[in-house]
Amino acid sequence: MTPVAPGHHTNHAMAYDQARGVTVLFGGDRGTPVNDTWEWDGSVWTSRVAGGPAPREEHAMAYDSARGVTVLFGGGDRQNYNDTWEWDGTTWSPRATPGPSPRRRHAMAYDSARGVTVLFGGYHYDNGDQRYGDTWEWDGRTWTLRASTGPSARYSHAMVYDSARGVTVLFGGHDGRWNGETWEWDGVVWTQRETTGPSARRGHAMSFDTARGVAVIFGGYDGRTSRETWEWDGSAWALRANTGPDATAEHAMVYDSARCATVLFGGSSGPSTGETWEWDGAAWGKRATKGPYGRFGHSMAYDKARGVTVLFGGNFWIYYRPHPFGDTWEWDGVAWSLRSTGGPSARTSHAMAYDSARGVMVLFGGVDDDLHRSRETWEWDGNVWSLRSTHGPRRRSGHAMAYDSARGVTVLFGGWDDWLDRETWEWNGTRWRLRATDGPTGRTGHAMAFDSARGVTVLYSGGWNSGDGETWEWDGSAWSLRATIGPPPLINHAMVYDSDRRVTVLFGGRSESYRDETWEWDGAIWSPGAGLGPSPRYGHALAYDSARATTVLYGGFDRDTHFEDTWECGPQVDCALIADIKASCASVEGGFNVRAKVITNLPEGTRIDLCLDVNECDLNGDERRRAVTVDSNGEAKAYWFGAPTGDLCVLVADCPEISAAVRCR
């Protein structure tokens, strides 16, 4: 799970460092505001430092070429900031405090002729949602208010400095409505220029192409997200392209003068928002990708013939609406590759299984963003999707499928359309056959896996009064209730069959809360499996990579976060944990308060155990144990009240134990 790119960001900021020839990215929203610093050299992204400005989104940055620093101002997390920071390529340094009031969604550009960073507009969430129409300039020492007239007060606009004409160009934003005006600042006054061109919009991004002398705009939101590319030559706007990156907003762009390319990264919608794109003045080209966009309700299965895990579809909530995906990705154990955006329409809550006899992925059903359910059967051969049937089971979503390799059929059970279904169907590659209408009660959100050693399909739990934690097995003729004791009743969990250890593996799901437990079924009883894995979630997907004897997990949801993490559990997982443990003690009545911080090489989101007193570090639960998550800085923190003296130990799944003395006296 080593990061190879910044991951999907929205409302981040970027600036191009001319002296070092790199694009600098800071912060943004990844389900929660972050404070990561990344640099793009035209080939690879590199994570630079942990720390600096507090986590935030909706801030602005510009590169001061005279002083060789990237300037950052404002933004917000749970509060609105008005701090100024500078990045010299090695360290973030706080600068002046006086200046513009706290704000976010403002815009900045560096005026190289006058040696000042220009800031305009923005708004304050908690101050009556106040919009600003003031113009400020930063000379490296102080902020100066230069104008209070000009463009209307607004936010989510974009600005660049036109070095050929010596003016700062502003376009669009939101001033109570979407705005489509073009303004220019010459250092003294604002002048409104063209009123025709791109549609009124907000959340777009701009860069200035110094080689061709044009300002470039991509994307934004004008009632729908845009994928248009426009250019401004100082006299008129011209529409240059409507292909390239997916339609998006809240992304960032800069111009890389060394390579004569406009660099785009991130955004708020579409599979490409984890991708890096570049515009050469004629066409867009994709340069790098992080992997699938965070999602839930997708499906995965392992293609044994080609040695890859295949993922299709899923769902992401944007502006409180579902946004299903129609993309196909493959994981080879090292990296994700986007294979197709054609084939089945965008959908979620479908099911997929790998037919090893015919070497194809079988997909059935699902639901789109208008809640229309499908009864289509599709197959993926590793190159293209083919629609195979529109007959068979009724249209549905929330069902489950597994491939019975002993009998050469794909088994489907349950799901939801207008009622909870309890039918059992089988697909032989040519047609569907209804096999049973009894067995488990009707249900949705259950999971199934085929146990090849015993020749049975295993089904566990599901939603809506579906049996309270029942385990069922299908032998090709009849269903048998095998157990009612094991994991808690679950919905939207995931299961796979580990053919090397001959157990069915279950992870996560939702019961009275989001779960992070791993369970294993050996055909007779359920037992707790590996701990200290992914954080609690539901709607994720699992696949078993038999070539590497590894269970692969991707994505899921926990009410606040669309996870975009890839996890593996298997004998080949190599941790090589490096950690620096720091702790401090404060004497209190009855013992000591202990604060601990562990700085690790583990990726963000990894869950680890911090335990006070090695002898008492009980993975089954102890009040001295703290299960914590590694943050974007590579740090994990814990706090104990009134603790006795003891040692501190760190436990991570598949990693060696590391301990350090606390020595409270």
Image (cartoon, rainbow, N blue to C red):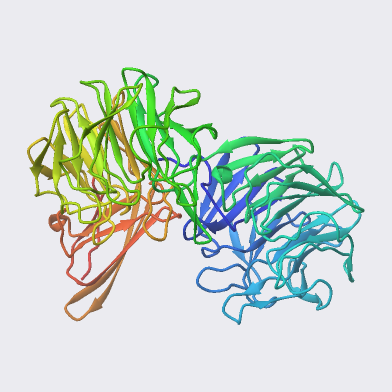
Compare residues 443 and 590 and report the one nearer the observer.
443
Seen from the viewer's position, the closer of residues 581 and 317 is 317
The answer to whether residue 573 is left or right of residue 477 is right
Please name the residue shown 53% across and 74% down the image: 79
At which x and y percent is residue 585?
Answer: 28, 70
Q: Give percent across and percent down for residue 195.
A: 86, 61
* Residue 26, quarter of picture: bottom right
Instruction: Please determine whether, in this image, residue 152 is positioned above or below residue 332.
Output: below
- The residue at 8%/41% (across/down) is 525
Q: Vertically, is 189 above or below 425? A: below
Task: From the viewer's perspective, tell me whether residue 291 is left or right of residue 194.
Answer: left
Image-based side of 226 in relation to 51, left or right: right
The quadrant of the image that shows the N terminus is: top left
Quadrant where the C terminus sits is: bottom left
Q: Position of residue 221 (x, y in %)?
A: 66, 57
* Left or right: residue 70 compared with residue 187: left
